């Protein structure tokens, strides 16, 4: 029912802006939504000069961040706590992971175990401050959609990440990921340890993140393209609306 309402809304609009190009493909190829009704507009961001970011030796520990009311985030924290972190901690006995997020419920606070390096912190005033202090961002997402703000923020802060194919979906195009993508417990844990210990790999991942920001989230380029598309739509509005019979029907 929700999917039908969302697709009907797209048809009724002259143009819908979608964060993820993966979802544009899904809507067009699997649900038949005309491409002319959609435009790709991801987050409008800017890359940061790498030399201004804290480097490998100035950072320590892992970070996991996200609103606790969002189901994929809560599932990721549970998966990290119960299965992934014990494997990481066995390899890195002095490492810690700091879990940040708004609306921290008691069930999340109950996971707080400093003696095992697992710290539930909750809300933080400036997420970028703590992101820049961490060496690796963990985002073991098993479901979800769209572009993940925690992962673009990690790139902006120069923090390499370990995530799943779901986490990276629609975010990098054909560019190498800003860290490592893995999909099972052992793979995620091994990736986290590698990225945490290997400075050369870490630096390459940080560079990849800045490249992704420049090529996929360039605010000036995306903004200019969007304005041009809106002006073109305005100039051909009546023709576009006549071609969108389904939209007229749904009105």
Image: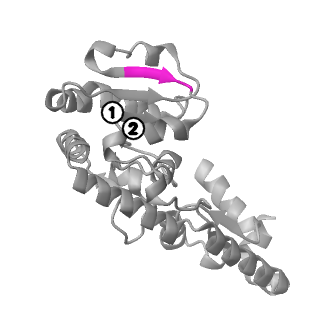
- Which residue range is magenta in the image? 119-123
- Residue 93: quarter of image: top left
Q: In this view, does 230 lie to the left or right of 100?
A: right
Which residue shows up at 61% across the image and 48% down it?
Answer: 2
Helix, strand or loop at mark 2? loop
Disc 2 marks which residue? 134
User: Badge 2: few (under 14), some or many (20 or more) residues near its Cα, within 10 Å?
Assistant: many
Horizontal side, residue 30 vs residue 35: left or right: left
Q: Measuring from the top left, give residue 83's x and y in whole percent.
A: 24, 29
Q: Main secondary structure of the magenta part?
A: strand
Q: Do the residues labelled 2 and 1 touch (CB within 8 Å)?
A: yes
Residue 100, position as x, y percentages in the image: 48, 29
Specify whether residue 122 is painted magenta: yes
Q: Which of marks 2 and 1 is nearer the N terminus?
A: 1
Q: In this view, does 202 lie above or below 136?
A: below
Q: Is residue 64 above or below residue 110?
A: below
Residue 168 is left or right of residue 21, and the answer is left
- Residue at 26% x, 17% y is 116
Q: Which residue lies furthest to the left in this view?
A: 91
Report how many numbered discs are placed on residues in the image. 2
Depth order, front residue of 79/2: 79
Q: Which mark is residue 61?
A: 1
Up-down: is 232 above or below 214? Answer: below
Mark seen at residue 118: none
In the image, 173 versus 178, the foreground residue is 178
| Other-residue count near label 1 (Cα within 10 Å), few / some / many at <14 / 14–19 / ≥20 | some
């Amino acid at each position: 029912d929700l999917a039908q309402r969302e697709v009907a809304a797209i048809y009724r609009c002259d143009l819908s802006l979608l964060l993820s190009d993966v979802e544009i493909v899904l809507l067009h190829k699997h649900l038949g939504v005309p491409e002319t009704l959609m435009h790709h507009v991801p987050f409008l961001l800017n890359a940061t000069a790498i030399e201004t970011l804290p480097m490998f030796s100035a950072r320590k520990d892992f970070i996991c961040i996200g609103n606790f009311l969002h189901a994929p985030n809560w599932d990721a924290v549970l998966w990290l706590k119960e299965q992934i972190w014990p494997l990481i901690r066995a390899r890195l006995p002095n490492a810690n992971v700091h879990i940040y997020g708004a609306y921290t419920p008691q069930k999340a606070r109950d996971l707080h175990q400093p003696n095992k390096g697992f710290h539930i912190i909750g809300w933080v005033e400036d997420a970028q401050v703590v992101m820049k202090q961490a060496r690796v961002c963990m985002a073991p997402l098993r479901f979800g959609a769209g572009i993940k703000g925690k992962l673009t923020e990690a790139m902006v802060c120069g923090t390499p990440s370990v995530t799943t194919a779901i986490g990276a979906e629609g975010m990098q195009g054909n560019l190498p990921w800003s860290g490592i993508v893995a999909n099972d417990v052992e793979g995620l844990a091994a990736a986290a340890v590698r990225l945490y210990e290997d400075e050369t790999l870490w630096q390459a991942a940080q560079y990849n993140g800045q490249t992704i920001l420049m090529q996929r989230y360039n605010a000036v380029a995306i903004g200019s393209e969007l304005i041009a598309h809106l002006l073109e739509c305005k100039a051909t509005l009546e023709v576009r609306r006549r071609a969108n019979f389904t939209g007229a029907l749904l009105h």
